[in-house]
């Protein structure tokens, strides 16, 4: 008798548990960007808040498919998007639920943060006073055409073709003029020495 009562109690408990257990549903869908209907969101985290926060990850093309219970609360989260919660409907005819999930981008405007290299206003004042301002275009041009700059360029830059041609023509003219010049032998010290020697030798022969 006790065994029969125990069996009946077990059957009643199983029946009550079965009545409390919600029907299973195949939950399938694709996750899209809420601002762009044709853009899928990959690798979205999907958590079942009604079942120990069981989590699955959508594929690279936003597709997912897994088993849930009717009236389960499903959460969709992704970096850069606002969280979205979906509740599975009850009393589904074919025990499957297919839908499109649209999550919207979440833009967070951060406050402006400015970084200064000076710890105090005194440091800024000191650096500002001692700062060397860059030369403007007029000052740069003035320095480039100064006498010192042109002299330095003359000694460092190679001659161009026109300068080389002028120098060669001047040298050729000088050589040509020197080749036709007549030198007075009386102005040549060597010639004077030869003349004196020849006169001396002549006097000796006369004696």
Image (tube, helix red, strand yellow):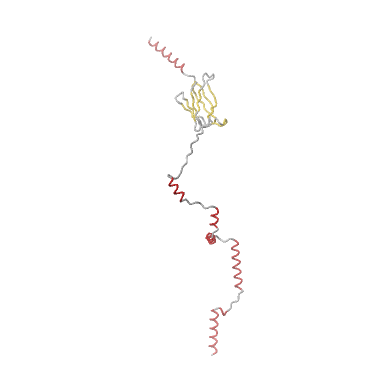
Quadrant position of residue 196 = bottom right
Q: Is residue 159 above or below residue 132?
A: below
Q: Give residue 197's position: percent from left, percent from top.
A: 53, 83
**Which quarter of the rendering shows the N terminus?**
top left
Counting every numbered tag in the picture gives 0
Left or right of 168 on screen, residue 50: left
Q: Give residue 108's position: percent from left, percent from top.
A: 50, 34
Q: Is residue 117 above or below residue 75?
A: below
Q: Give residue 173's position: percent from left, percent from top.
A: 61, 69
Q: Is residue 101 above or below residue 204?
A: above
Q: Give residue 168's position: percent from left, percent from top.
A: 59, 66
Furthest toward the top, the residue is: 1
Furthest toward the left, the residue is: 2
Q: Is residue 6 above or below residue 67?
A: above
Of the pair 109 and 15, the residue shown nearer to us: 109
């Amino acid at each position: 008798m006790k065994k029969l009562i125990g069996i009946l109690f077990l059957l009643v408990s199983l029946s009550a548990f079965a009545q409390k257990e919600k029907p299973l549903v195949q939950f399938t869908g694709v996750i899209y960007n809420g601002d762009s209907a044709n853009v899928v969101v990959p690798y979205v985290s999907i958590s079942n808040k009604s079942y120990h926060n069981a989590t699955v990850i959508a594929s690279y093309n936003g597709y997912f498919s897994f088993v849930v219970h009717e009236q389960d609360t499903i959460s969709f989260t992704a970096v850069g998007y606002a969280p979205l919660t979906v509740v599975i409907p009850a009393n589904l005819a074919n025990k499957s639920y297919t839908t499109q999930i649209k999550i919207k981008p979440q833009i967070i405007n951060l406050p402006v943060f400015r970084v200064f290299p000076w710890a105090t206003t005194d440091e800024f004042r000191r650096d500002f006073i001692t700062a060397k301002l860059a030369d403007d275009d007029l000052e740069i041009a003035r320095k480039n055409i100064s006498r010192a700059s042109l002299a330095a360029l003359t000694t460092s830059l190679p001659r161009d073709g026109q300068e080389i041609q002028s120098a060669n023509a001047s040298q050729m003219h000088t050589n040509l003029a020197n080749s036709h010049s007549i030198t007075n032998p009386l102005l040549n010290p060597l010639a004077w020495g030869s003349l004196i020697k020849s006169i001396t030798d002549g006097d000796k022969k006369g004696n």
